[in-house]
Image (tube, grey):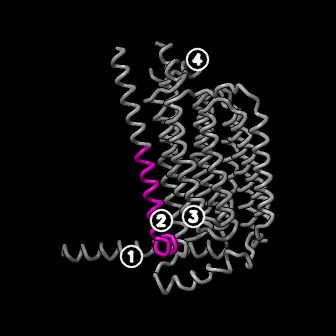
């Protein structure tokens, strides 16, 4: 039993991550505000990083963690870039809403 | 078994994301969904052991193209324009192209087939000569950096020129817009 | 005499240090022999997976953006830390553990940063928290 136990554990984690990714995708699709979508995209990226790690351990070759590291980097840079656009270029409805509040 | 199920789940998530991109009319959401799309396809590349392609897909698809699309939206409108004509002709074109591509995959060798043409002609030659010619442990790096060095140099030049062009366009447009605002004020 | 005292205390403390190292060593080898670390690693991974689902479920079901932010941070901190620690314990001491540690450190810094950036951008753009939450926050300020 103990030889196959890690296999089942990693399988369980992978199924959990799959379900979580699908849930986050649903929120990304019908998130009412823009920031919901940004948050879901960021969360999806985190799930991807974890998924690559779990996949490597499940297939017995955890050598692909470099990509997971790269994804974590890209995810952070992407989120900050998107938010910088919203913050400083003030695209679309964000600007109009702020003007309306004043 | 697990690989197959993983591939099926990832591919169905990919299809769902693509359908969501088509259905969505708010372009910011489309940009974010396309980032997720490229993350998913990079995951598929990882499950296929194509790690370098996954690297590229993540960097280009989720990183740069998201920023480029966002800057494009910043210059245009964030809402999709209503189409004036029906989508019938593009739909037929897409279906025919897709069918042709699927028909083309029928001739491809199976995944991991040792008798595939890519593995029988020059591949073994490169694998045998790389440790002798150049002392680089990764054969892909050796081919890209040495055997096909001029090609890679050309690619780098093209990408560099494209990046400089995009930067010039964006900065010029921003300055022009600021000038216009100053003129109005 | 002072030198002798110093020497003695030096010996005593190095003895304590060696005993500590010895105790840790014995405990680690015993744990490894009986598979305790494996079991801890499995528990960590299972709980990390459950945390990931909880975070995703919360970010799907919660009513407004601010509570969804809270739910997403469960995955960002709890799920990530538990899963990466579990994977590191499972692999033992090697390069993989170092990479996992790098990923963990990076996500530990950037996760809250990006969540804060999202919240800040939402607040600046005029997305207000619900009235009850604002009242609670103002009461905390007093």
Q: Mark 4 and mark 1, same subunit?
A: yes
Residue C113's label in the rendered image is: none
Percent x, y for residue B66?
54, 42
Residue indicated by mark 1: C15
The chain carrying label 2 is B
Label 2 to label 4: alpha-carbon separation = 58 Å
Residue B52's label in the rendered image is: 3
Q: Is residue B7 left or right of residue B77?
A: right
Dot 2 and dot 4 residues touching (CB under 8 Å): no
Q: Is residue C71 left or right of residue B137?
A: right
Q: Is residue C91 left or right of residue B142?
A: right
Query: How many C-alpha atoms fall within 10 Å of the one at disc 3: few (<14), some, or many (≥20)?
Result: some
Query: How many C-alpha atoms fall within 10 Å of the one at disc 2: few (<14), some, or many (≥20)?
Result: some
Residue name at image x 51 percent, y 21 percent: C126
The correct choice, above or below, for B1 with respect to C57 in the image is below
Check disc 2 and report its element: helix, strand or loop.
helix
- Relative to the observer, which residue lies in front, C141 or C22? C141
Residue stretch rendered in magenta on the structure: B141-165
From this viewpoint, is residue C24 visible? no
Disc number lying in front (4 or 3): 3
Label 4 to label 3: alpha-carbon separation = 50 Å
Residue C131's label in the rendered image is: 4
């Amino acid at each position: 039993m103990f030889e196959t136990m890690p296999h089942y554990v990693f399988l369980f984690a992978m199924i959990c991550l799959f379900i979580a990714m699908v849930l986050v995708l649903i929120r990304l699709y019908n998130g009412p505000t823009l920031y919901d979508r940004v948050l879901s995209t960021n969360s999806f990226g985190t799930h991807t990083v974890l998924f690559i790690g779990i996949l490597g351990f499940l297939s017995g070759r955890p050598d692909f963690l470099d990509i997971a590291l790269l994804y974590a980097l890209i995810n952070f840079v992407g989120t900050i870039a998107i938010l910088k656009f919203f913050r400083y270029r003030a695209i679309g409805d964000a600007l109009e809403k702020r003007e309306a509040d004043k | 078994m697990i690989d197959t199920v993983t591939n099926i789940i990832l591919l169905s998530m990919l299809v769902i994301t693509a359908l969501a991109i088509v259905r969505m009319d708010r372009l910011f959401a489309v940009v974010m969904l396309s980032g997720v799309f490229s993350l998913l396809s990079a995951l598929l590349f990882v499950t296929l052991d194509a790690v370098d392609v996954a690297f590229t897909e993540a960097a280009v698809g989720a990183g740069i193209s998201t920023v480029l699309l966002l800057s494009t939206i910043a210059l245009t409108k964030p809402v999709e324009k209503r189409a004036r004509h029906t989508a019938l002709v593009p739909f037929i074109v897409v279906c025919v192209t897709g069918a042709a591509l699927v028909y083309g995959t029928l001739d491809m060798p199976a995944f991991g087939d040792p008798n595939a043409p890519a593995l029988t002609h020059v591949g073994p030659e490169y694998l045998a000569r790389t440790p002798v010619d150049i002392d680089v442990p990764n054969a892909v790096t050796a081919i890209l950096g040495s055997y096909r060095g001029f090609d890679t140099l050309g690619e780098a030049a093209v990408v560099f020129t494209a990046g400089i062009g995009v930067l010039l366009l964006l900065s010029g447009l921003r300055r022009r817009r600021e000038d216009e605002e100053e003129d109005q004020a | 005499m002072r030198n002798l005292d110093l020497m003695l205390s030096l010996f005593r403390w190095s003895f304590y240090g060696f005993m500590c190292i010895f105790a840790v060593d014995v405990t680690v080898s015993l744990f490894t022999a009986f598979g305790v670390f494996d079991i801890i690693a499995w528990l960590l991974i299972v709980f990390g997976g459950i945390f990931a689902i909880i975070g995703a479920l919360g970010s799907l079901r919660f009513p407004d953006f601010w509570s969804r932010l809270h739910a997403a941070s469960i995955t960002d901190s709890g799920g990530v830390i538990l899963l990466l620690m579990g994977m590191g314990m499972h692999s033992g001491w090697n390069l993989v553990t170092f990479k996992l540690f790098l990923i963990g450190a990076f996500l530990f810094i950037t996760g809250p940063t990006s969540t804060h950036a999202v919240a800040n951008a939402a607040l600046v753009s005029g997305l207000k928290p619900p009235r009850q939450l604002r009242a609670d926050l103002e009461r905390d300020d007093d």
